[in-house]
Amino acid sequence: MVATHPHPTPINRACAVCAGPVGRPAAEELWFYGHDERRGERIVAALADTGVPVTAEDGYIKAPLAGAAVPLLDRVAEALSEAERATERVAWIIAGTAPTRAVSQGLTLQDELRYRWFARLLDEQAFYMHFQPIVSLRGREVFAHEALVRAQHGDRELSGFEIVTAAAQTGLIVPLDARTRRIAITQFAKADLRGKLFINFQPSAIYNPRYCLRTTFEALERTSLRPEDVVFEVVESEDIADTDHLLRIMQTYRNRGLGVAMDDFGAGYSTVERLLRLRPDYVKIDKSLIDHVAGNAAARARIAEIVRLAAAKGCRVIAEGIETVAQHDVGCEFGQGYLFARPALRP
């Protein structure tokens, strides 16, 4: 029969389908669902000689990834007709996130196969980082570097925007976010770059901070970086209605000695109210405000107000997107942009 989850919302309690309390230790599995009994038997048979210990329960077929999803997806696709691939659904269960969320975001197998290239990038952990300096506008020295994800697809380099867009379309923000956090830490430590490391993270990719961030902390412990050398930067590409959840994530970082920053302030969903409640260590003023600062008294007044509010809460301010000398003098402590350096493996 078609699998259904006993309680798609809320996802904050014990669940038989989730194999224990939501937020259990990290697992990496593909869950297939939406099949009848006969199709389920064919899927299990198709995976039988892969060496993967497949289990079938509650209408789900669960297959550990063992670091490689594409071979499993291909094997199941070969066993199904085109019509069946259009109705069979796939969910990635990654890094302690609630399976209910993964199931709600699952794609049909047919759609998943269209993004086989992206799943392969995840399998191979083929992402890498370009780093862009964050510069002290007072002392003229490099204060930090922000890690910006890149990947090669065919004969061209994918931008961070293209990568995150593909992850969002496939419901794979969680594995992307977990992998790129680890890659940023490892690559930065090997590059021996100066200053702190700023790493972006998507709040929606973290369900239970204790489990979801575990591999990030393990990666940090394997390098020479100290916790105080790393700042995690909230990417508010969507409205995070649960500010309490965001506070829990930020507190988890702070408890380990890491810094936190609020990105793109002054645009999108960032608000003064959220700034006052979250009290990040750093606030990054969005490029859209910096773009209009030259000859624009209103934009300058808005930036001055943000700097004042941030200072009152002990937050340090970074101006993003500085491209001209005229944008340089905006009253912020730090700046980032093409005026100083473009993102590069070694800027």
Image (cartoon, helix red, strand yellow):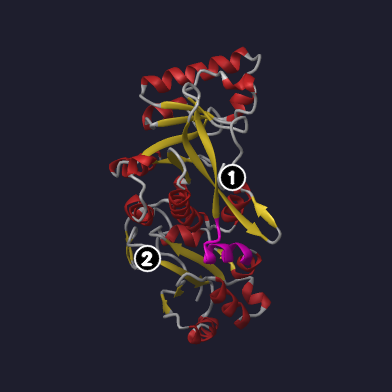
Q: Of all residues shown, which one is farthest toward the right?
A: 155
Q: Is residue 293 on the magenta stretch?
A: no
Residue 3 visible in the snapshot: no
In the rendered image, residue 79, in percent from the top left (x then y), is placed at 60, 83
In the image, is 151 to the left or to the right of 209? Answer: right
Q: Which residue is mark 2?
A: 18
- Front-most of 251 and 101? 251
Q: Which mark is residue 344?
A: 1
- Front-most of 61 and 255? 255
How far is mark 2 from mark 1, CA to CA?
A: 41 Å
Query: Which amino acid lies under the numbered mark 2 shown in the image of this protein?
Result: Cys
| Dot placed on the residue nearer the N-terminal end, 2 or 1 | 2
Residue at 41 percent of width and 57 percent of height = 97
Q: Of all residues shown, which one is farthest toward the left?
A: 255
Residue at 55 percent of width and 61 percent of height = 126
Q: Which mark is residue 204?
A: none
In the rendered image, residue 256, in percent from the top left (x then y), is placed at 29, 44
Q: Is residue 120 on the magenta stretch?
A: yes
In the image, is 20 to the left or to the right of 197? Answer: left
Dot 2 crowding, Cα within 10 Å, few <14, some 14–19, many 20+: some
Say which element carries label 1. Answer: loop
Count of all numbered marks drawn on residues in the image? 2
Q: Range of the magenta residues? A: 116-127
Residues at circles 2 and 1 in contact by the CB criterion of under 8 Å: no
Dot 1 crowding, Cα within 10 Å, few <14, some 14–19, many 20+: few
